[in-house]
Every structure is written in C-alpha cells, then in structure tokens.
Image (tube, helix red, strand yellow):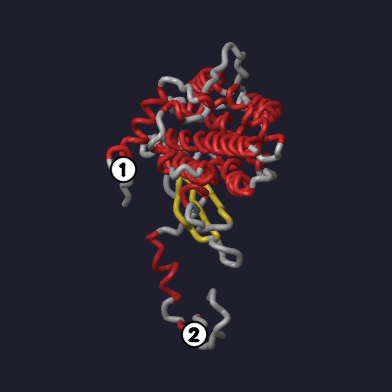
Amino acid sequence: MSAPTDAQPHGLPLWEVFIRGRRGLSHVHAGSLHASDATMALRNARDVYTRRSEGVSIWVVRSDAICASSPDEIDPFFAPAADKVYRHPTFYELPEEVRQM
Amino acid sequence: MTEPVDAANLMTTALFTYALRLGDDALILSQRLSEWASRAPEIEEDIALTNIALDLLGQARALLDYAAVVEAADRDEDDLAYVRTEREFCNVHLVEQENGDFAHTIARQLFFSTYQLFLYEELISSTDELLAGVAAKAVKEAAYHHDHALQWTVRLGDGTDDSRRRMQAAVDRLWPFTSELFDADEIEKSLAVQGIAVDPSTLRPRWERAVSDALATATLALPPTVWTSHGGRRGVHTECFGYLLAEMQYLHRTHPGASW
C-alpha cells in the first residue's frame, strides 16, 4: 500500500465508501471521501452517495486499511485464469427467475 | 348570526398565520444554508448543508402552499415567498442570522434543529391532517439535521483550541436568539387547545436539557442569558433580514413568474 492517507492537504483522512443498493445485493464500492472519523464518514457518505435513494446500507473503511494488489503483479495474479474457460458457469442454462448472477 | 362567521374567520386567520410561521422558519433557514453552496469547508460538507437546505425548502413549500389554501385569497406559495415584504414575514430571528464562520452555522443548526425536531414530534399528532402529514415526513429530516449539528458541535467544541474558541463564540453570540423559539401568543395557544398546533413554550424544558447536554459533551459552557431577542413572529426583524430578502426575491420580482 502507498503512503499513509493521513497527510491530506486539509488534514482529514480518506475513506472508501461501499453501498448496498437493496436487500440481497452485496455492497459495491461507490467512491471515496474525506472525514475526521468513522461516524462522520458514514454521515458524509449518506449525503454524498445516497441522495437519490441509491442505498439501504453503507460501509466505510479507511483507505489506508485496504491492502491492494499491485499493477506489477497483474500477470502472476490474473493471467493463469485466462485460458481456463471451464471455470466459467457458461455450460448451464440459468432459469429466468435468477436475475442477480 | 354574525358570531359563528367571526369565529370561523378568526380560526382561518390563526391557522394561516401558524402555517406561515412554520413555513417562514424553514424557508429563511433554507435560504441562509444555501448561501454555503460552493463555500463550505469541504465538498462533503457543501453537499450536507445544501441537502439540509433542500429538506427545509421542501417543508417550506408544503407549509406555504397550505397557508395559501387556508387563506383562499388568490395567492400561491410563490406569492407568499417572493412578494411579501419584510414586515409580513413571521420567522424567528434565529434563522435569519448570518452564517458567520462554520461554527456559527453549526450553533444555529444545533439550536434550531433541536427545537424543530421536538416540535415536529408533537405536531405528528395534530388534528389537522395536513400539518400532521408534513410533520410525519419532516420529523425524519429534522432528526438528521439534529444529528449533523450534534456531531459537529462535539467535534468543534472538543476539538482544537481554535475550533473550541470559535464554537464557544458562536454559541454565545446566538444564545440570545433562542428564547424567541418558545414564545407563544394567542394564535399558538388557541390552536393548541384545539389540538391543531403545538404550544412552543411546552417544548422549552426538553430543549434546554438536550442543548445543555450537547454543550456539556462538547466541553462548551452554557452562556448566561443577558438579553433575549423577540419580535420575528410579529414581523419585526433584525437588520440582516432585509438583505437576505433582497437576494432571495430579486429574481422573482425582476421576472415575475419566471420558470425554467
């Protein structure tokens, strides 16, 4: 992970925001924002990302708490999966009722 | 035969004035908060303050529209918002006070949203269907406005030396304007007896407890009451109000009925 995000120009740490659109779906990364602490980050996320009824649940996590894969590792991480089509569930017929696959 | 008609007129006037008072409080605070657009300390806060302004504008529209219906004098919500003069507005002085620094805006929010939250919580049981309906929707908004103000009051008060000094100065400066929130005249009292309105004086003990708790948590001192400001409900306003109206009404007065 890169340098700590505490050293923002205006002193507030950066937070990543995850929103769940409705029950049954998983939380999806919506964006990031600045806030002094977790409580304020939740409040800010509510104002910034759910003004148009986008969500029923919000997660926030400090950006410097996220461990991310490095662009240099793209090949060892992801390339071996490219030639294994049998891992995709494309050989099944999905019933109409299953919408969220 | 004239007596029942007079009583009905009196009732109509009282209900009109009451809806106008609640609506004007929301409208004028909304106008003040929207002055923060593009000027807040952070973009997140910019959006939060303008969100609150929009909530209040929604409340103002419902209440002014209702006032216009009750009055039945061929005026609509726009006429009430944009063509009345200073002396015809009956909002409290607190909501018209200038934004000042961010701490002043937060102190004003804390004082007003606490009052508005408790007011709407009571108004939900109004025998007037429309007032009860507006309150039921607005109480959730007020709860959020109150929480927003509370969070910031604690962070600024119990923050750095500078934020604490500014927050205390803001609380001291705006304290004299809080007493007016609880003024009740014949209009509120007569409507409260009928179960239509909330007598604001009954909200005072709860408000004082909540605000002094908030200030204590924020390590701020409750200011002594040296003087109190009154008169907004009768249309007597503080100096800054005329400037606010000039800006708010300019477009409508220059281009009546403009829309886009």
Question: Could you tell me which chain the residue with mark 1 belongs to?
Answer: B
Near-viewer residue (A30 or B27)? B27
Near-viewer residue (B188 or A92)? B188
Q: To which residue does mark 1 refer?
A: B256
Kindly identify the residue that appears in the image at 71 percent across and 26 percent down: B205
Neighbour class for label 2 at 10 Å: few (<14), some, many (≥20)? few
* Residue A88 shows in this picture: yes
Residue B250 at what x, y percent from top left? 32, 35
Please indicate whether residue B209 sits to the left or right of residue B73 in the image. right
Location of residue B243 by image quarter: top left
Location of residue B188 by image quarter: top right
Please indicate whether residue A80 sits to the left or right of residue B148 in the image. left
Looking at the rendered image, the quarter that the N terminus of chain B falls into is top right
Residue B217 in the image: above or below residue A95: above
**Of the numbered discs in the image, which one, if any, rests on residue A90?**
2
Residue A74 in the image: above or below residue B47: below
Disc 2/disc 1 C-alpha distance (Å)? 63 Å
Residue type of the residue flagged with mark 1? Pro
Kindly identify the residue that appears in the image at 57 percent across and 13 percent down: B227
* Residue A5 shows in this picture: no
Secondary element under disc 2, as helix, strand or loop, is loop
